[in-house]
Image: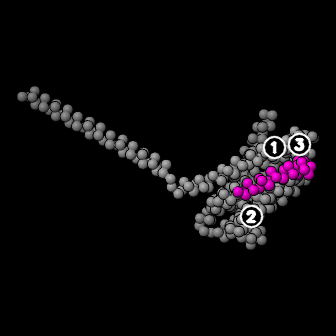
């Protein structure tokens, strides 16, 4: 009787253990099924088109196009300058290094303008956005005019500092002095393009870049070969194309009432410029550090 009771208890325990295992397996299977279902729903949501995706594509594609445009035009420019000889290519290359080192640190004019304009546009503060653009343009004008004076008068020692020898220096100086004339407009274009991005419009700067590069490619052979201006003609063509881009963007901003002319008439106070300059200082230090490191590494390797 005792053995029979013990056997019954063992059978009951085994049955209970089996039921528990089945319940555990069923629970695990249910959890796995729920996880797979959630994963499926997530994947469906990820690939399902929505208005935000279309908006991202609408903004991103022209920006990518603009990035792809510059190297292609630079390649065509190099091919044309190459017909003037190795010294011309070397001079233009050194001048471009000087120009980039001098002005890339002011990329903050566009980088800081975009988020500020985007916030003001989102809040409907269009008058404030116009004043923000005007401040950036005033900074561009002051820095650009200063650059014309400094780089124009010190162009020879500067290009020699960047590695130009006595044979290359005349070409480098001729190109730099011609291109530097558009320095204020070059800096202003950063502000203009940053403002358009803040308004979620990358198409307009892209189309204006196409127009400016068409002007550039048209003037290059005309000034270099037809008028026989050499590398100075190349610099003038680049300056004119930059002016085309900037003046076109400014005209469109005024027409679209993104920028009010009255905001350009009076220079902003230093206090109004401090937020932009504070942000710009950090970005400029970062950019200058990168450029300096690359230049030092290149010079060391050479």
The residue positioned 74% from the left and 72% from the top of the image is 262
Q: Is 181 left or right of 25, judged from the image as shown?
A: right
Say what secondary structure mark 1 lies in.
helix
In-front residue for pair 237/179 = 237
Quarter of the image with the C terminus in it: top right
As drawn, which residue projects farthest toward the top?
3
- Magenta-highlighted residues: 207-232
Residue contact at pointers 1 and 3, CB within 8 angstroms = no
Say what secondary structure mark 3 lies in.
loop
* Residue 233 visible to the viewer: no
Q: Quadrant of residue 159?
A: top right
x, y percent for residue 1:
6, 28
Q: Is residue 106 above or below residue 7?
A: below
As drawn, which residue projects farthest toward the bottom?
262
Q: Is 269 left or right of 3, judged from the image as shown?
A: right
Q: Which mark is residue 84?
A: 3
x, y percent for residue 289:
73, 46
Residue topped by disc 1: 78
For label 3, count other residues whose C-alpha is less than 10 Å away and answer few (under 14), some (14-19) or many (20+).
some
Q: Earlier in the sequence, mark 2 or mark 3?
A: 3
Q: CA distance from mark 2 to mark 3?
A: 35 Å
Q: Quadrant of residue 35?
A: top left
Q: Nearer the viewer, mark 1 or mark 2?
A: 1
Residue topped by disc 2: 250
Q: Earlier in the sequence, mark 1 or mark 2?
A: 1
x, y percent for residue 98:
82, 47
Q: Is 170 left or right of 63, judged from the image as shown?
A: right
The residue positioned 74% from the left and 64% from the top of the image is 250
């Amino acid at each position: 009787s005792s053995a029979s009771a013990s056997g019954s208890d063992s059978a009951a325990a085994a049955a209970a253990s089996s039921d528990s295992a089945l319940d555990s397996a069923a629970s695990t299977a249910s959890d796995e099924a729920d996880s797979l279902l959630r994963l499926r729903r997530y994947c469906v949501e990820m690939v399902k088109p929505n208005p935000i995706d279309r908006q991202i594509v609408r903004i991103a594609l022209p920006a990518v196009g603009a990035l792809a445009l510059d190297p292609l035009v630079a390649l065509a420019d190099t091919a044309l300058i190459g017909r003037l000889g190795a010294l011309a290519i070397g001079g233009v290359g050194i001048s471009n290094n000087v120009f980039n080192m001098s002005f890339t640190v002011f990329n903050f004019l566009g980088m800081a303008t975009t988020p500020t304009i985007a916030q003001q546009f989102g809040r409907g503060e269009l008058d404030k956005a116009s004043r923000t653009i005007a401040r950036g343009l005033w900074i561009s004008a002051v820095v650009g005019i200063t650059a014309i004076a400094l780089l124009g008068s010190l162009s020879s020692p500067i290009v020699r500092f960047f590695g130009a020898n006595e044979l290359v220096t005349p070409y480098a100086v001729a190109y730099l002095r011609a291109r530097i004339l558009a320095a204020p407009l070059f800096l202003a274009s950063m502000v203009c393009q940053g403002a358009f991005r803040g308004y979620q419009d990358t198409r307009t700067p892209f189309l204006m870049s196409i127009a400016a590069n068409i002007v550039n490619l048209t003037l290059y052979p005309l000034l270099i070969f037809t008028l026989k201006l050499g590398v100075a003609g190349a610099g003038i063509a680049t300056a004119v194309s930059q002016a085309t881009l900037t003046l076109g963007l400014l005209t469109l901003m005024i027409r679209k009432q993104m920028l009010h002319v009255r905001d350009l008439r009076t220079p902003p106070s230093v206090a109004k410029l401090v937020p932009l300059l504070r942000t710009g200082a950090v970005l400029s230090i970062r950019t200058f550090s990168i450029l300096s490191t690359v230049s030092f590494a290149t010079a060391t390797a050479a």
